[in-house]
Amino acid sequence: MIKTKKQIWNRLVLAIFIGLNLFFLTQCTSEKAANRERDKIVKPIENSDKIKRLPSISYHLISTKDSSTWLRSLKAGDTLQALLVLNRVDQKSLFNIDTLVFPDSIGNGIALYSPFPQGISELQTVHKILFVSHYAQAFAVYEKGELVKWGPVSLGKKSTPTPTGLFSTNWKSKKTISTVDPSWIMEWYFNLANFEGVSMHQYALPGYPASHACIRLYKEDAYWLYHWADQWILDQSKISVYGTPVIIFGNYPYGQGKPWLLLAQDRNALTISVSELMGVTKDFLPTIMDRQAKRDSIEANF
């Protein structure tokens, strides 16, 4: 059968049309397959809480005497800040310490070195809470279960230990003179136990527990907490509304060495787990929530 030119042309156009459709179908299928493979990689990462976790840090010990030239050369910044915070010391007292712990990674700020968990789902209904650890000599601030700040402290020495339990931020003062020793000038002062004199405030951090039962802080941390925490509300000299809850917990191993130096052997030596924090919080939680509800009710009427 002899095909006319028109028939040949029609068959050629049809063949080209079918070929193009097959090409685009193959491309579309390949693109969808590629997208599926990409989604397998991307989606788990986007939805995983691992992106909120901080990388693991290793630590080593350095001698202050052997590193004195380098230490004296450090200027304000992340390296010096990491060194001071990890050793619970201020710059003035740095060379009074023989051995220092130091990280193998320097981050932006001190979040990398926090011994506290980043989030506590059981505390999502708690507006504000402050934890202070004897063992870690550190504080942590949580808002609705999320860690928003942490830092070093110097708690009470063995003869005048800082009491443990549930406290609240009562009254505050920008500057207070100690009734124990008038030479002690305490800035950004926040009282925690009115009749016991327990408080948190700015004062020297020598790298070990040294206070007269108070919570010593860096000046910048004391200033921050002074403006963050709520004061009590009194009604005829009685507490009508409590301030921000503060839980002080744990034990310091007096005479057994500084716990943070153990980081060189075990990077988790200071790690405080969610279960540990909830273990010291669960008995206080009903009281905390009752007090919070009362403050919310009163503040809603203002």
Image (tube, rainbow, N blue to C red):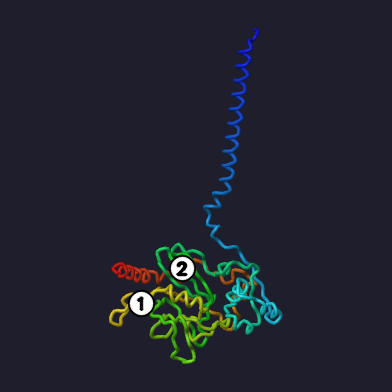
The location of residue 189, given as percent across then percent down, is 44, 81
Q: Amino acid at mark 1?
A: Trp
Q: Secondary structure at mark 1?
A: loop
The N terminus lies in quadrant? top right
Give the labeled residue for mark 1: 232
Residue at the spot x=55%, y=82% of the render? Answer: 205
Residue 37 lies, with reference to residue 253, above or below; the image says above
Whether label 2 touches label 1, CB < 8 Å: no
Q: How many discs appear?
A: 2
- Say which of 257 and 221 sits in front: 221
Left or right, residue 17 beside residue 179: right
- Amino acid found under the numbered disc labelled 2: Tyr
Crowding near pointer 2: few (<14 within 10 Å), some, many (20+)?
many
Q: Quadrant of residue 23?
A: top right
Above or below 161: residue 25: above
In the rendered image, which residue does mark 2 sit on?
Answer: 142
The Cα atoms of the two marked residues, 2 and 1, are separated by 19 Å
**Toward the viewer: 238 or 166?**
238
Residue at the far front in the pictured view? 5
